[in-house]
Image (cartoon, grey):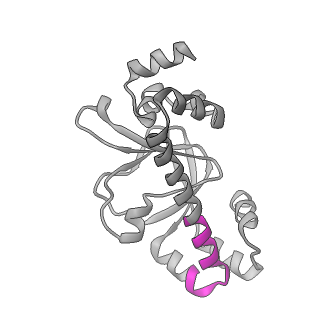
């Protein structure tokens, strides 16, 4: 629980009452490696903080080689099919633990109660949503403005740990190239 407190303390000053109320709504869960814990067309009912592990966001396809990986989340980050969470509509993608993963999760209803009961709830919610938006915006701009090789090099420089824990087929999908094209890029770089 200390990890999420440290993370939230960077965002806002949290009173003891607010912290105790918020943490009382959190549930710890362990997700084994390779487990899909939100399936296509399920409504996302949680926002989770990753205590340990790596999670992949992807659009499944009949042919697993054609799945589209569009995001990763790591230790000390929040994870959710956030659009489904907000709209209460089925998710168009899945969440998968790429490694053994431990999450601290809060349900939609409990989060709404945190928003109405605490002073910090709305502020933390807004700032977290803003951070998620900035990550998404940066990814979209990279896809539009950088070549595949530039995207790979940028990813390698910003997140070198990715290459240690994430299979290359997911990285190739994430940067928008085939596995063969990624292999050629890696040889050049």
Work out which quarter of the rendered image holds the N terminus and state it: bottom right
Counting from the top left corner in percent of width and height, residue 145 is at 48, 40
Counting from the top left corner in percent of width and height, residue 140 is at 46, 48
In the image, residue 49 above or below residue 111: above
Q: For residue 12: magenta?
A: no
| Magenta span dominant secondary structure | helix
Work out which quarter of the rendered image holds the C terminus and state it: top right
* Observer-nearest of 128 and 52: 128
Q: For residue 128: magenta?
A: yes
Q: How many labels, in total?
A: 0
The residue at 54%/49% (across/down) is: 138
Q: Which residues are magenta?
A: 114-129
In the image, residue 188 above or below residue 114: above
The residue at 53%/82% (across/down) is: 113
Q: Which of the 4 image quadrants contains residue 125?
A: bottom right
Left/right placement of residue 123 relative to residue 145 reads: right
The residue at 39%/28% (across/down) is: 177
In the image, residue 181 above or below residue 29: above
Counting from the top left corner in percent of width and height, residue 53 is at 59, 43
Please, which residue is most extreme toward the left here? 62
The residue at 55%/65% (across/down) is: 129
């Amino acid at each position: 629980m200390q990890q999420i407190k440290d993370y939230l303390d960077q965002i806002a000053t949290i009173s003891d009452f607010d912290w105790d109320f918020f943490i009382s709504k959190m549930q710890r869960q362990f997700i084994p490696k390779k487990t899909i814990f939100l399936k296509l067309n399920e409504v996302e009912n949680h926002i989770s903080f990753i205590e340990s592990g790596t999670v992949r966001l992807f659009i499944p396809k009949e042919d697993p080689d054609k799945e589209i990986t569009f995001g990763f989340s790591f230790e000390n980050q929040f994870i959710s099919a956030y659009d489904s969470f907000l709209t209460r509509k089925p998710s168009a993608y899945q969440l998968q633990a790429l490694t053994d993963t431990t999450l601290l999760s809060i349900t939609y209803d409990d989060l709404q109660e945190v928003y109405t009961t605490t002073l910090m709830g709305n502020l933390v919610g807004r700032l977290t949503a803003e951070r998620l938006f900035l990550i998404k915006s940066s990814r979209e701009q990279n896809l539009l403005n950088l070549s595949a090789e530039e995207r790979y090099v940028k990813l390698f420089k910003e997140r070198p740990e990715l290459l240690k824990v994430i299979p290359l087929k997911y990285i190739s999908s994430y940067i928008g190239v085939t596995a063969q094209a990624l292999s050629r890029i890696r040889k050049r770089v």
